[in-house]
Image: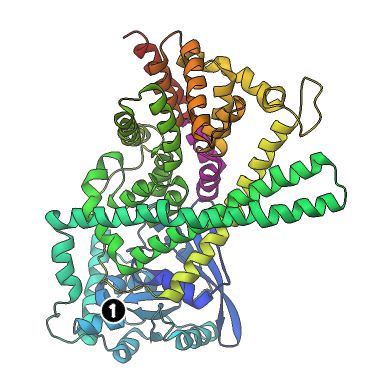
Amino acid sequence: MLVGNPNVGKSTLFNTLTGARQHVVNAPGTTIAVAEGTWRCGTMDVSLVDLPGTYSLIARSPDEQVATDAVAQGEGHVHVVVLDATALSRSLYLLAQLAVTGAPAVAAVTMTDLAALRGLSPDLAVLGRVLGVPVVAVNGRTGEGSEALAHAVHRSLERPRTVRGLPSVVEDDATLTSELERAQVLFDWVEDVVDQVLPTVEARSTVSDTLDRVLLSPWAGIPVFGLVVWAVFELTTVLAAPLMSVMSGFVDGPVTVGVQALLEAVAAPAWWQSFLVGGVLAGISAVVSFIPLMALMFAAISALEASGYLARVAVVADKALRSIGLDGRAMLPLIVGFGCNVPALSATSVLPHARQRLLAGMLVPLTSCTARLAVYLVLAQTFFPRNAGTVVFGMYVASVVLVVAGGLLARTTVMRDLVPQSLVIALPDYQWPHLRTLGRSVWSRVVSFVRKAGTVILMAVIALWVLQAIPVRGGHSVADVPVEDSVYGVVSQGVAPVLAPMGLDDWRIAASLVTGVAAKEAVVGALAQSYAIDSTTATGVVALRDEVRATVTETSGGHPEAASLALMLFVLAYLPCLATLAEQRRLYGWRWTTGAAATSFTGAYVLATLVFQIGSRL
């Protein structure tokens, strides 16, 4: 087991040691993800578990509880304790707590190069003699020291060794009457060890110290943070877009043409061709189109984390997010959500505690992604042609308000146990991310997304095809049926009266909202399909606007502006897209995903109804 403080290079070391032979699982009885992998130690393969980072084995969060339980239940296991050479005292305290349990240990010392820059290089040979366990210097980014660590663990598995020299700090020690006294005994031991292994010189100022004087100040830190967020946002909206088009175009183009040719060659039935092309291949296209986006986002988040900058982001943005139970580290995923909710959910991994990750993951779908922007633009230009820009801006303001309101609501209901605490975070020295380690991390995360979330997306797209392909009236054949005569159309007609309180009682609007669950950008296309209009041409767009305005004017009883605002707010909040739902399910499980979706839908329905009912009377 890998045990260590946050930001000591533990997960980087894990990725280097296990390579591609790793996977992510939930800790027993929890939704907290831990990584497991196979590591070659000498002549044997061992199972390596990367536990959540913790400063203490006295758990104060679910993540720390997972680490504490794993150590307590790890009888017969060798614990690789990762020590940060730049903050040796803090790391040794965790090692001391583990040593009290009698667990065998091996010390892996990271950040030795950064400690050398400060003039505080610990004497590892002396440290090994003092501790009585193997001590190995490692560099998780380059792999330096990995072989020596493997041999040390191999020897420890054959002949376990525990930390020596600790004072008597056991539960039945009558001389220690409080937890504070026990901690003080360990701190005294840590101080004695540090005095023996560190040079008695004053630490030198480094580039990190100079940068922090600028980046942690309000006058420079916030603008720089805004620039970084803008760059990440651009990454998800600009750079990823052409790559997504290439990936989906490959499936929609050459692959689809090839499959169609093969099906025609074997004289496959028309419905079977439609199923494979419009269902299976369309679902695969939806999944693979997300791969570049997810890879770029994973790379950006991992690079920012490895560089040490994410810890500074938490400090800069902490105060703004404290009111909704989160800390500053939640700012990045929430901002990314305005580009795309899917990578934003994955970005919540930067949060240290499971409950914080869960709350942030439930709030991310309320951030208005760019896919919703296409819907806002069409509706705003249709109903508010002179103030379209103001209306669209108002939707983004509404999104921020919903995020805050959702956080406050959660804190008084399902997240009552989430108490905002002062942000205590180590600020590691800045360093360049290592490309090989970065690549391994991105690869494992993308594979996990495709394997888990991709399956949900594929099955949902196929289900949508089935609903549109099966006729229920009109004597049509399978996969050759007008939308209004399919199961999809009939269901939409049955759903439409539910939208009457919002002034939107029309099956075509209902159908577009159903399609919007698959992908928000498909709402406009679904409307055009229902009206049999080609929305890809300028003339078609004008015709679509005219038809939609006429429909909403009729359904709203002559109050189209109020109804259109209700529709935009409903699109903003009613349900996230399938990819987002799939990613939520992957990260948090079905129970939380379903509960959040139901709450969001109910809130959106009530809000849209109020907007129309009040607006239509003004």
Q: Is any part of residue 214 visible from this angle? A: yes
With 336 as the anchor, is 46 left or right in this view?
Answer: right
Q: Which residues are magenta?
A: 576-600
Amino acid at pointer 1: Ala
Q: Is any part of residue 6 visible from this angle? A: no
Image location (x, y in percent) of residue 367: 38, 40
Relative height, residue 492 to residue 315 (above, below): above
Relative height, residue 452 to residue 211 (above, below): above
With 403 as the anchor, is 202 left or right in this view?
Answer: left
Check residue 590 for magenta coloring: yes
* 405 or 533, nearer to the observer: 533
Quadrant position of residue 560: top left
* 7 or 547, nearer to the observer: 547
Image location (x, y in percent) of residue 541: 49, 30
Q: Quadrant of the C terminus?
A: top left
Circle 1 SS class: helix
* 572 or 561, nearer to the observer: 561
* Residue at point 27%, 89% (across, down): 123
Q: Residue furthest bottom?
A: 125
Name the residue beneath numbered marker 1.
85
Relative height, residue 358 to residue 488 (above, below): below
With 574 as the anchor, is 406 left or right in this view?
Answer: left
* Residue at point 35%, 12% (across, down): 614
